[in-house]
Each structure stands twice: as C-alpha cells, then as structure tokens.
Image: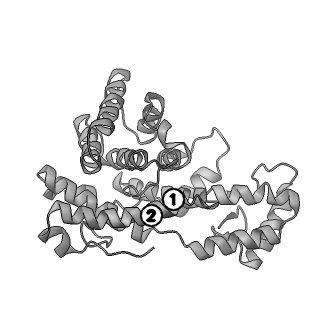
Amino acid sequence: MRGAALDTQTVAGQGIEDIAVTAGAAIGALDAVVRRQERWAGAWRQRLALSAAAVTARQAGRVEDEAALRDAVLLTRPGGNVGPAGLFFLAWRRLASRPADDLLTEKNVAAVLEDLGLTLNDEAVSDLTDDLRQLAANTGTVETLVGAFAAAERYGLRRVLGAWLADVLLAQRLGWTHAIPLLGAKATLVVGTCRARRPVTAALAAGAETEADWAKSLLAAQGCAPLIFSPNLSAGRTGCLRLRRNSGPRRRTSSWKKLLSDDAIVASEQIAGMSDRGLRRLFDRLVELGAVRELSGRATFRIYGL
C-alpha cells in the first residue's frame, strides 16, 4: 500500500482539514484491502495485535518483547496463567478476533480493563460504554478518535485503553467486521514523522493541549499506521498457495485455516485427525517449501506462522 506520509511540516504547518485529507487517503487505501476479506486477514490482524501488546508492555514498564509475549500465550495451557504481559496480548487479541460490533459491550470492556490491569466498578463500566455509544452516534470520525482518548482520561484510565477504544470505534465507523490494531500497534510513532521515537500518547499528554492538537496528532498516527503496517500481499498469497498445494485434503481444512486465522500456532495445537508428531512433520516440510516460517528459532517448543 502506497501513499503520502504525514511529515513534520505537514502536521505542524497545516490545518486539521488538510491533515484529515492525507490521513483519509491512507485509511481509504487500507479500507480497500480490508473489504477484500483476504483469507489471511485473521493472521494479519493477530500479528498487529502482537505488536500492540508489545507496545503496551513497554509502556507498563515491562521487558517482554513480541517473542516473549507469543511464548506466554501459546505455550501456556488453556486457562493457565499467562502473566501480566501475556494479558496485554490477550486484550489486543480480543480486539482483533471478535466482531467489531460486539467489542464495546459492558462484558467485553470489563474483560479488557482486567487484562490491561485497570479497574472500574460495574457502574463506571456501564457509564463508559454509554458514553462510547453516544460518541459513535453523535460525532464525526475525528471527534470520535479524540473522544475515545478523552473518555479514557475522564475515567482515570491509561491512554493505551484510548488507543484500544479508538481502533474499535474506527472499525465500527467504517463498517469493518473486525477491528485492526492501528493506534495500538504504532503507539511509539513520532507524531508527524512516522518514525519510532516518541510515543503518540506521550506527545498527546505533553504537547497537545487543545482538542485540535489532539485531533492532529491522532490523525497523523492513523495516517502513518496503514502505510507502515500494510500487509505483504504477495507473500500472503504465495504462502496460501504453497500451503494448499503441499497439504493433504484433511490438512487443508484444518492446519491451513488455523494458520490463516492466527498469528502463529504450536505443533501441539489440537487439530482433528492429526497427532503432534504429524503436525510437526507437516510444518517442518512447509518451512522447507517456504509456505510457513518457524518463528521461535528453537529446536524444541517450535512455533509456526505465515
């Protein structure tokens, strides 16, 4: 995906309307990709969720990187303790995997708050979801993005929740079936330069004193995120084709679909009709063919993904 980046001069020297046009063009290009509903879209969203979780972990003062977060979730038995950083990953995975229209229910918002280590009583959660519904119904896109961060601030919550809420509200506004972690995955974006140096959330806190400044900062982030995180279309399609050609009929309908819908899977994944050893042999063969990558770099407890 190609488009004009929002450079420092654009953000500092132009009005919000001009920045909105540039950001809108980038989002429009992303929208065209999303609406094609590529088979690998689930894996793409989950990989962005992993990036967002790593950003969240750093903002919380933790040292876990993307590999450690992936291990925490994939190598823990279902229902087991994935640790505080692993919970960040689960929060962003929730955004990427559940229907966008269901994400702002009281139940889902309460679960995300818990995953992010935030606390609100039931009444406050209800008030927050009501505020978000009114925000989505009565404001434009720019005001909605700003309002998501303002709501997080108003309830004394971290701005990372504002990024989570803004990504959900953008997806709902555009009519996407699933949200995409854009702001969350690029929270280390330098406002207006598209380079990872200063967190957007920090910039908002330190330098964006007016609503217009907030809007300009968020539009810059939204405009850069689709350009930086655009999917590798040729690699995704080639991997899908190779996977289909080199798997048996039963495997095509199980391991193939799982790989296309998630960031990564382990050889111990429960797939009907396949043993751990059989699945491992399949994945190792697909790695040789270039259809799948081994992501852990280990000889044991290996993890595979597109």
- Horizontally, is 205 left or right of 133 in the view? left
| 204 relative to 248 in the view: left or right | left
The reply to whether residue 23 is visible in this rendering is yes
Q: Residues within 10 Å of mark 2 (few under 14, many from 20)?
A: some
Question: For residue 30, which numbered disc appears in the image?
Answer: 2
What quarter of the picture does the N terminus occupy?
Answer: bottom left
Answer with left or right where residue 299 lies relative to residue 231: right
Task: Give the quarter of the image for residue 244.
Answer: bottom right
Q: Secondary structure at mark 2?
A: helix
Discs 1, 2 touching: Cβ within 8 Å:
yes
Q: How is the image coloured?
A: one colour
Q: Residue at x 52, y 57 (%)?
A: 35
Residue at the spot 52% in from the left edge and 44% down from the top edge? 94
Q: CA distance from mark 1 to mark 2?
A: 6 Å
Q: Which mark is residue 115?
A: none
- Amino acid beneath label 2: Leu
Residue at left offset 32%, top offset 75%? 4
